[in-house]
Amino acid sequence: MKFFHIADVHLGAMPDKGFSWSYDRGREIWESFQNVIRQAGRENAGLFLIAGDLFHRQPLLKELKEVNALFASIPDTKIVLIAGNHDYIKENSFYKKISWAKNVFWLSKEELSYVEFPDLGVRVYGFSYHSREISEPKYNQIQISSPMPVNILLAHGGDENHIPVSKDTFLYTPFDYVALGHIHKPQVLQKNKVIYAGSLEPLDKNETGAHGYIKGEIRNREIYTEFVPASIREYKTISVQAKEESTQFSLENAIREIIEEQGEEHLYTILLEGKKPAHTEFFTDAFYKLGNIRDVEDKTTMAYSKEQLKENYKGSIMEAYLALFEKEEKTENLEKAFQYGVEALLESGEELL
């Protein structure tokens, strides 16, 4: 029996507000969600698990109806979901007003409950958030009685304000599989057993790398899983090395080539590193026109020779500054301070006095 495990879809989010692609990103989150639902139907998945934060905030009734229609489009797949900290169940939540399709099972209680599927030999446990924060480690030492052949826990948490999870929380878990949500980076805590699916789409520039969902299969009470990359875009950080002979034109060409190679649809942070000649400034604002550029960080340092500086600036403040540091024991922090000082003098022109 195949199953799908997703988490942290964050329907309704619009990442990167203020950027030209922000509206498209909101639409693409819905598109990715539709894609994974359709894929589960194509593969005849028996079970579809949603480990919290399906919505980025309190869902609107029309959004819930849209989601419910998508669920109903795969009637042979049993869908089990919980609410997370972003879409927690408030007193007046529209979650309480939706009549779910027959194949949808909503673990809405604050305390642990379960739904069982005798035809699949599976029982799924979980509970939903009814407040934005839960600091109690509620997953510690959960015990179950009269287990089914396969027992699954739907869980959402992982930091001090949202049900703390440590490396030992699920070390001796009675569950055959723990489908985790809340942490947006996909990660395996225990192979084929305790897994964060990660967010379906990346939602922040720091969420680099592949995003998607977990696809699993239960065979003879054994569980086998794989991560399936599925996001429409990725956030990528690329390093561009400046050299003493680099020009604005050559750097822009280098950035264009990298973006063409890695994918023009993705969202980039540019790290400009390396050495640049003295009295040279690169116009980093011009880089934003080269693609979907989220940020540019100029970490270049000036290229210089201490011996050449001595020769060029005899009798100046620069010569005195160089002499001062020659007497000091070399450490990494001292070298950085020395470098900043040289650059400040070169940029200010004070070395000519």
Image (tube, rainbow, N blue to C red):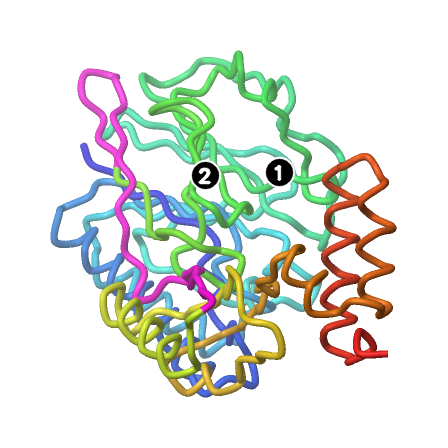
Q: Position of residue 269 (x, y in %)?
A: 48, 67
Q: Position of residue 298 (x, y in %)?
A: 58, 69
Pick the front one: 263 or 80: 263
Looking at the rendering, in which quadrant would you find the N terminus? top left
Residue at the image position 28 percent from the left and 50 percent from the top: 229
Residue 132 seen in this snapshot: yes
Q: Is residue 103 above or below residue 270?
A: above
Residue at the image position 45 percent from the left and 81 percent from the top: 287
Pick the front one: 242 or 350: 350
Q: Is residue 136 above or below residue 244?
A: above
Residue position marked by numbered label 1 in the rendering: 158
Q: Is residue 10 above or below residue 20?
A: above
Identify the amino acid type marked 1: Gly
Residue 204 seen in this snapshot: no
Residue position marked by numbered label 2 in the rendering: 196
* Secondary structure at numbered mark 2: strand
Identify the amino acid type marked 2: Tyr
Q: Position of residue 164 (x, y in %)?
A: 68, 34
Looking at the rendering, in which quadrant would you find the C terminus? bottom right
Q: Is residue 203 left or right of residue 79?
A: right
Q: Which residues are magenta?
A: 216-244
